[in-house]
Image (cartoon, grey):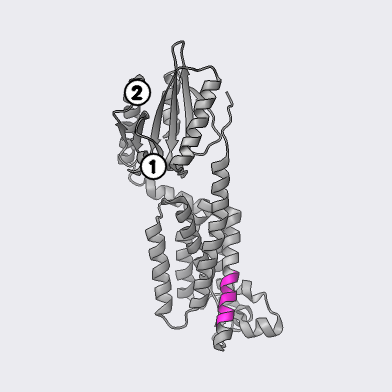
Amino acid sequence: MINSLNEIFSLMQYQKITLNIPGIFLNVKTSAESTLAIVTVDEQSGNIYTKEQFENISLQIRNFIQNNNCLRYRFLYIIISDDDNCIKRLLSNDVSYWRIVPCANRLMIFETACDDFLVLREPIENMLLQTSKKSDLNDSTSIFDKEVNVRLAVMNIGIIVLNVIIFIVISILSPPGSDDISDKLALDWTLVINHGEFYRLLTCMFVHAGIDHIYNNMIVLLFIGSYFELAIGRMNYIIVYFSSGIIAGLTSMFYNMSKNNYVQSVGASGAIFGIIGGMTAIILVKYFHKHNLDLKKIIFIAFLSLYSGFSSQGVDNAAHVGGFISGFLISFIIYSIRTVKEKKKCFKITA
């Protein structure tokens, strides 16, 4: 949508000024009488600002225009958002603003809007009308987008493939009725503590107890993990996945030691719960749904998975809880730091 708006602004003789501010765009048209400035805020891009942050950004933009000898200027703010509270959250009542509602492909013009910008109304409404028609003709677009997102999540898909390959290899090499290979890779706190076999904290994440076990784990990982990787990045995904898996294993070890439970643990569920916790943390930081997953859905999945574990026999709930909490905390720190850095970036002029 931003590209289409920029084309319209360009046809109307507006000059695009590049800002180093995520999700905010500036177009300026200067004449002998005055300067018209359009500030477009695209909340679809995933950047949500508070009123204080946006007022600071607006002040910087106004100062830039004034410093370029533009003493008479008029502003129009175009907010692209499905959030009905976006105007109240960002703007004061005395500014000129329009709102584009993406889910309805609708332009809303308010009473405070400056008449100098009304010439843009018709081309923008025509653009939205064409977008709506394309959407009606391509109902499968959202499904296609999800498939593309899943395909692009390279690390997540790679981990799923690796789990499946290891499961097949173990199944082929293990004698009928024998668990010798799995026993050598499973997490056993007595062997880790007494014999220093710390490698089991890692290998146990790639061993599964049967077809149902690996199928259930990989389905959840495919659904959640791909979105998580796209939201946090490939390297951060790897950090969260393996850190959560190892911490989940440690949690399981110390819990079973305290209870004198002599058990073996296998499966990727500790790391997967770390991914679920991580996705929950991201949505809490962003205060909006990401990649078609909202907070209610994530919490529901986490609750359902935890409840299923606590109500079933033979499930390592300590690992699940440890994985979820560690994934949440690690992701919260990573994503919070990245978000703060993005917000602190000041804009630059490329003219």
Examine the rendered structure and indicate whether residue 235 appears above or below residue 305. above
Magenta residues, start to end: 246-255
User: Residue type at mark 1?
Assistant: Arg
User: Residue type at mark 2?
Assistant: Cys
Is 75 or 129 nearer to us in this picture? Answer: 75
- Callout 2: SS: loop
Magenta stretch, main secondary structure class: helix
Q: Which residue is mark 2?
A: 114
Mark 2 residue crowding within 10 angstroms, few (<14) / some (14–19) / many (20+): some
Residues at marks 1 and 2, CA–CA distance in whole angstroms: 21 Å
Residue 300 belongs to magenta span = no
Residue at image coords 57%, 69%: 245
Pick out the residue farthest to the top.
32
Looking at the image, residue 113 sits to the left or right of residue 166; the answer is left
Q: Which residue is mark 1?
A: 89
Quarter placement of the N terminus? top left
Looking at the image, residue 189 sits to the left or right of residue 2; the answer is right
Q: From the top left corner, tell me how far across and down residue 253 is, in percent.
A: 59, 80
Q: Is residue 206 visible?
A: no
